[in-house]
Image (cartoon, grey):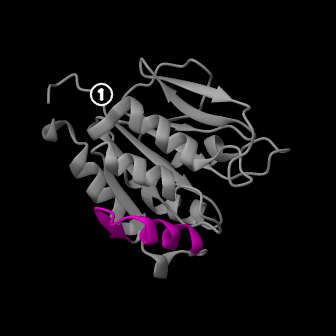
């Protein structure tokens, strides 16, 4: 690996995942050497409040993702409601209005699979609480590309279906409570680990 190697953390979640993010995102180190890309299932017809909720709490800059926006390290990007969020070559962010996946747009599988293609082994993917199976197939794609996989411990999840679907499909690198995730991510993606 080199000092300039791009890295990313992709995070997906649904019901109960904002509580998990409240533990995870504010604890990420300001010197994080990775882009953080987040897709949560949100109501399609309402504007997202995620940027305004998390910006005052996080050491990293927080944005709502824009189409064709270049990714930079040390920033958090949230998928806007009713758009799939993908990573394209560059790497840049891409928004799509392709049909929902698992009844969801944004869909976690779409983000994880595109990020696995773009980043390969330089990607860490985190699947949080949720009430369907979105994210499990994408997490498997991350693992097959050599990336690191983290699943929220079902006992700590508000909705266990999403973590359990992932655990039924693959053996992740880590199964963690939300409070334990940021220290692992900070260690994996600190500038010292490059």
Residue 146 image offset from top left, x and y in percent: 27, 45
Disc 1 designates what residue?
Answer: 6
What are the residue bounds of the magenta stretch?
Answer: 161-176
Would you place residue 130 above or below residue 72 in this image? below
Residue 151 image offset from top left, x and y in percent: 41, 64
> In the image, is 190 to the left or to the right of 101?
left
Task: Name the residue at 35% across, 33% down.
Answer: 119
Q: Nearer the viewer, residue 56 or 39?
A: 39
Residue 131 image offset from top left, x and y in percent: 65, 69
Task: Name the residue at 13% across, 39% down.
Answer: 192
Would you place residue 188 above or below residue 183 in this image? above
Would you place residue 106 above or below residue 152 in this image? above
Q: Nearer the viewer, residue 123 or 19?
A: 123
Image quadrant where residue 194 sits: top left
> In the image, is 13 to the left or to the right of 187?
right
Q: Nearer the viewer, residue 162 or 16?
A: 162
Task: Name the residue at 57% across, 17% down.
Answer: 68
């Amino acid at each position: 690996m080199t000092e300039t190697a791009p890295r990313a953390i992709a995070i997906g979640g649904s019901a109960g995942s904002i509580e998990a993010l409240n533990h995870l995102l504010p604890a990420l180190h300001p010197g994080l050497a990775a882009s953080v890309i987040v897709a949560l299932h949100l109501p399609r017809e309402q504007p997202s409040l995620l940027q305004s909720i998390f910006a005052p709490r996080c050491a990293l800059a927080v944005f709502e993702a824009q189409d064709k926006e270049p990714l930079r390290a040390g920033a958090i990007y949230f998928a806007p409601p009713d758009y799939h969020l993908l990573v394209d070559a560059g790497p840049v962010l891409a928004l799509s209005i392709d049909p929902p996946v698992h009844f969801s747009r944004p869909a976690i599988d779409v983000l994880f699979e595109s990020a696995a293609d773009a980043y390969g082994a330089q990607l860490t993917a985190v699947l949080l609480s949720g009430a369907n199976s979105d994210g499990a197939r994408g997490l498997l794609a991350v693992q097959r590309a050599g990336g690191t996989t983290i699943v929220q411990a079902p006992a700590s999840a508000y909705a266990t279906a999403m973590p359990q679907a992932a655990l039924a499909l693959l053996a992740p690198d880590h199964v963690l409570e939300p409070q334990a995730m940021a220290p692992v991510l900070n260690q994996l993606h600190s500038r010292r680990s490059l």
